[in-house]
Amino acid sequence: MLNVVFFARVKEQLGCAKMSLDWDDSLSTLAGLKSYLGSVNGETWVDVLSEDNLVCAVNQTVADQHQEIRDGDEVAFFPPVTGG
Amino acid sequence: MSGSIPLSAIVQNERFDVAELQQRLLGDTHEEGAIATFTGYVRKSNDSRIVNTLELEHYPGMTEKSILEILTEAADRWPLLGASVVHRVGLLQPGDPIVWVGTASSHREAAFSACEFVMDYLKTRAPFWKRELGPEGARWVDARSSDESRARRW
């Protein structure tokens, strides 16, 4: 099982705060996960998940496209942060 | 060094009292040397748009973790006696305190530098997002490249 969470503008654009996916080996990289989410959910998802400034985190640590994902991980997608 | 000094990251909706936070940090660090603090307040307007309410979203868990990482890095770079961050989330009004950073050290240079470093890193690394609600509706605040430049100086 993979838990995927979305925040702020990304959450609003996708109309989704979180989802759980059954584990599959095609989800074992961030690029693979994004490609799966786009193919299943349509054009808006493809657009939002391919934005240059999209930030990804795996198990609450910021990660790049090549980051390996394992069964049980928590993956997050969000826009650049604006706290402080 | 950072393993043995008090570092704290608190995320809360409630208003905070800066005098109380400073007193607590002073007590945690055995009351010596210097404490530098920074308090951020909600703006009344931003990019000439009126702000009636500011909504702050965050990523529970990662927020506290990333702030503690920033404080640990500050403690690795400067000889700190302790450091704390309190950041509010939820609905805030213009003029409300939103963030407080306190850094304690034996000498002022380390306290000043660490305080600025923590704020600069917090702005670009801790997962908070601001949404402004005003007469023209709601809008997500965009990240500023100047904040990223400031963080890269360190």
Image (spheres, coloured by chain):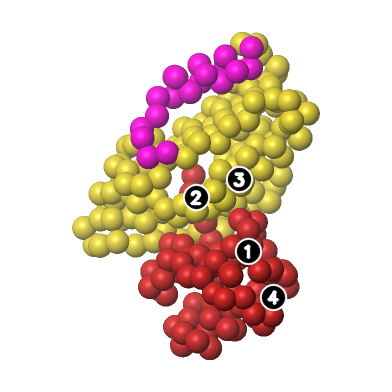
* Chain letter matching colour yellow: B
Which dot marks residue B116?
none
Of labels 1 and 4, earlier in sequence is: 4
Closer to the camera in the image, B13 or B143: B13
Estimate the spatial distance between the alpha carbons at disc 4 and disc 3, rounded to whole Å. Answer: 24 Å
What's the chain of the residue with tag 2?
Answer: B
Estimate the spatial distance between the alpha carbons at disc 2 and disc 1, rounded to whole Å. Answer: 16 Å
Magenta stretch containing residue B28, yes or no? Answer: yes
Q: Which numbered mark, 3 or 1, is in the foreground of this view? A: 1
User: For numbered disc 3, what is the local secondary structure?
Assistant: helix
Residue B64, x across and y down, in percent: 56, 43
Q: Give the range drawn in magenta.
A: B12-30
Q: Is residue B113 above or below residue A20?
A: above
Which dot marks residue A73?
1
Which dot marks residue B65?
3
Name the kind of residue labelled 1 in the image: Asp
Name the kind of residue labelled 2 in the image: Pro
Name the kind of residue labelled 4 in the image: Ser
Q: Quadrant of residue B116?
A: top right
Mark 4 closeness class: few <14, some 14–19, many ≥20 residues within 10 Å:
some
Instruction: Please report the residue visible at 70 percent of the width from the left and 37 percent of the height from the top.
Output: B72
Q: Which numbered mark, 4 or 2, is in the foreground of this view? A: 4
Q: What is chain A's hue in the picture?
A: red
Q: In the picture provided, is A47 more to the left or to the right than B45?
A: right
